[in-house]
């Protein structure tokens, strides 16, 4: 058996090579891989010894040679292929070990690997006879199989080939994305092409299989973009049942919302309670316990089975408070004390306890429908509060501005048509997912109850008529923020002035379907 080794990532390389050598496998190595083996005293042939041709062009050409590729691609079931190898004195290669230059670490022309992908694809194509390893994580199992059986099974070579093509596909996708951003020539794309290029090459790798999909009869998983480390990879699960598809979806929404709430009120604590990706309650408070109590009081019925996001550490006293409330499917926080974990595990064994780093900014949004997809950049809150425009005779107080900011933040992350009412830093009424904005306003008012009096409200899009606004002012709302842009803006502003309330326009809409 002969193995060709040519790797960038040399993790576990020497140990793997020593294991192969101990089994009588002849080793061939190139460039830096050969040096690593030489330094470790592992016997091997250099690629130049096999090809009879030295490396050239600063190492750009090493393995691109007929004596290498014929050895990898020969179909040993065909007598004519065996004869061709014998005629040219070429020894077949049975194992190719190759991982590619880390292009995303420093995108450049020099990190576009050519020989590596050529060898990997050749070996994967000929996986009926050749095993191809593209990750150090494969070394142990492959070596064990060679030691145990003397060869690799068809199933193993098939699985390795599949991983190899995925490896080169992800690599090519990374290069394409770099070229879309201008590449070495700095050819800046248009605004449209920068977000939605002519072709989109997404390479996703499975990070974890969820307990089930959106429903128990569905299979689900979380994927990450290949070569990235999203914040979810830094999450630690301390206790509770396996995570489901919706646990992840809702926890992501909750964790992002509490961080956004803190952006407008850095001196306060933030807690959000999410149910089906919408807030049942969200609050700013003087402490995490204060914020949790306020968020829960906004809608304790809907909080059952939801996700609690705490922008800080959960200690024993807060854990006791949360455990005394409705059952939470997930509690996600910056950290948990050991006593807090013990308290929650005792009271709520099934609740998933997740500690998490801060979320990275939202990236590209991809939503599939059938064999098509909708793609857009992230919906960010671009216009800061300081740039909102007051269009009424009444002007906002500092407390009204803070409540308007809370309402606006929550509203932007609520399924439209969305109306959110906030009072004293607490989202006390959320109307979501309705075909009519008036109905959403009515739901928000009903949930807010007496807390609507003196409160602030937000609408994710303009009021097409004054009736939605009037539903809010009739309940006692005294300030409203909305994008504006309706042909009836003047009519709506006039209604606001008649009611004596504050109205702010942001100029940006935040539909969330």
Image: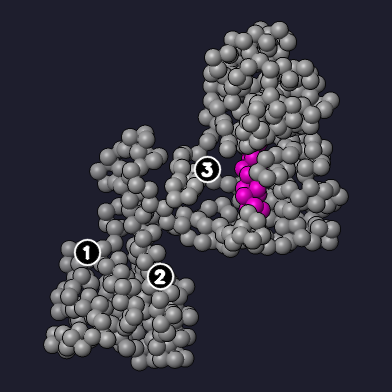
Label disc, if present, on residue 362 of the rendered structure: 3
Callout 3: 10 Å neighbours few (<14), some, many (20+)? few
Please state if 272 lies on the left or on the right of 415 as rendered: right
Callouts 2 and 1 close, C-beta under 8 Å: no
Query: In this view of the protein, can residue 86 be seen by the observer?
Result: yes
Label 2 and label 3: CA atoms lie apart by: 30 Å
Quarter of the image where one finds residue 130 = bottom left
Q: Is residue 442 left or right of residue 181?
A: right
Q: Quadrant of the N terminus?
A: bottom left
The answer to whether 11 is drawn above or below residue 363 in the figure is below
Q: Judge from the rendering whether residue 434 lies leftward or rightward of residue 101; answer left or right.
A: right
Question: Taking 149 as reference, is 325 left or right?
Answer: right
| Of pointers 2 and 3, the one earlier in the residue sequence | 2
C-beta proximity under 8 Å, tags 2 and 3 = no
Q: Of the residues under marks 2 and 1, which one precedes in the sequence?
A: 1
Q: Is residue 274 above or below residue 59?
A: above
- Residue annotated with mark 1: 60
Q: Residue at x 64, y 40 (%)?
A: 257
Place of residue 206 in the rendered image (x, y in percent of width and height, measured from the top left): 51, 61
Q: Which residues are magenta?
A: 246-263
> Where is residue 190, by image quadrant?
top left
Residue 250 magenta: yes
Q: What residue is disc 2 on?
A: 162
Q: Position of residue 168 (x, y in %)?
A: 35, 63
Mark seen at residue 401: none
């Amino acid at each position: 058996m002969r193995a060709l080794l040519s790797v960038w990532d040399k993790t576990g390389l020497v140990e793997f090579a020593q294991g192969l050598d101990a089994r009588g496998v002849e080793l061939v190595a190139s460039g830096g891989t050969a040096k690593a083996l030489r330094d470790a005293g592992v016997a091997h042939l250099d690629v130049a010894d096999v090809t009879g041709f030295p490396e050239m062009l600063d190492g750009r050409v090493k393995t691109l040679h007929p004596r290498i590729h014929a050895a990898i691609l020969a179909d040993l079931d065909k007598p004519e292929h065996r004869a061709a190898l014998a005629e040219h004195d070429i020894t077949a290669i049975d194992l190719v070990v190759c991982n590619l230059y880390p292009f995303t670490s420093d995108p450049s022309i020099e990190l576009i690997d050519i020989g590596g992908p050529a060898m990997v694809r050749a070996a994967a194509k000929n996986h009926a006879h050749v095993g191809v390893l593209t990750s150090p994580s494969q070394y142990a199992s492959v070596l064990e199989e060679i030691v145990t059986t003397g060869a690799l099974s068809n199933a193993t070579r098939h699985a390795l080939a599949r991983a190899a093509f995925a490896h080169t596909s992800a690599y090519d996708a990374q290069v394409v994305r770099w070229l879309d951003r201008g590449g070495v020539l700095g050819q800046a794309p248009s605004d449209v092409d920068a977000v939605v290029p002519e072709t989109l090459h997404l390479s996703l790798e499975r990070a974890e299989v969820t307990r089930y999909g959106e429903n128990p009869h569905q299979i689900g998983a979380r994927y990450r973009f290949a070569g990235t480390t999203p914040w979810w990879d830094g999450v630690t699960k301390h206790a509770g049942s396996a995570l489901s598809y919706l646990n992840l979806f809702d926890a992501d929404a909750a964790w992002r919302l509490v961080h956004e709430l803190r952006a407008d009120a850095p001196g306060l604590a933030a807690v959000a309670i999410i149910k089906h990706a919408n807030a049942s309650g969200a609050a700013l408070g003087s402490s995490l316990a204060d914020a949790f109590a306020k968020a829960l009081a906004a809608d304790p019925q809907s909080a059952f089975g939801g996700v609690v996001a705490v922008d800080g550490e959960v200690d024993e006293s807060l854990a006791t408070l949360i455990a005394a409330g409705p059952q939470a499917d997930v509690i996600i926080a910056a950290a948990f004390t050991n006593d807090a974990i013990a308290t929650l595990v005792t009271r709520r064994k099934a609740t998933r306890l997740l500690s998490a780093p801060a979320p990275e900014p939202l990236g590209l949004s991809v939503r599939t429908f059938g064999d098509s997809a909708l793609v857009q950049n992230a919906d960010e809150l671009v216009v800061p509060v300081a740039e909102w425009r007051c269009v009424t005779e009444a002007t906002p107080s500092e407390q009204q501005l803070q409540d308007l900011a809370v309402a606006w933040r929550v509203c932007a992350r609520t399924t439209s048509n969305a109306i959110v009412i906030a009072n004293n830093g607490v989202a006390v009424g959320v109307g979501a997912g309705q075909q009519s904005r008036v109905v959403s306003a009515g739901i928000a008012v009903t949930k807010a109850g007496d807390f609507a009096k003196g409160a602030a409200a937000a609408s994710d899009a303009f009021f097409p008529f004054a009736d939605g606004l009037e539903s809010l002012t009739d309940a006692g709302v005294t300030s409203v923020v909305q994008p504006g842009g309706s042909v009836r803006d003047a009519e709506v502003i006039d209604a606001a002035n008649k009611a004596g309330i504050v109205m702010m326009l942001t100029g940006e809409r935040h539909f969330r379907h």
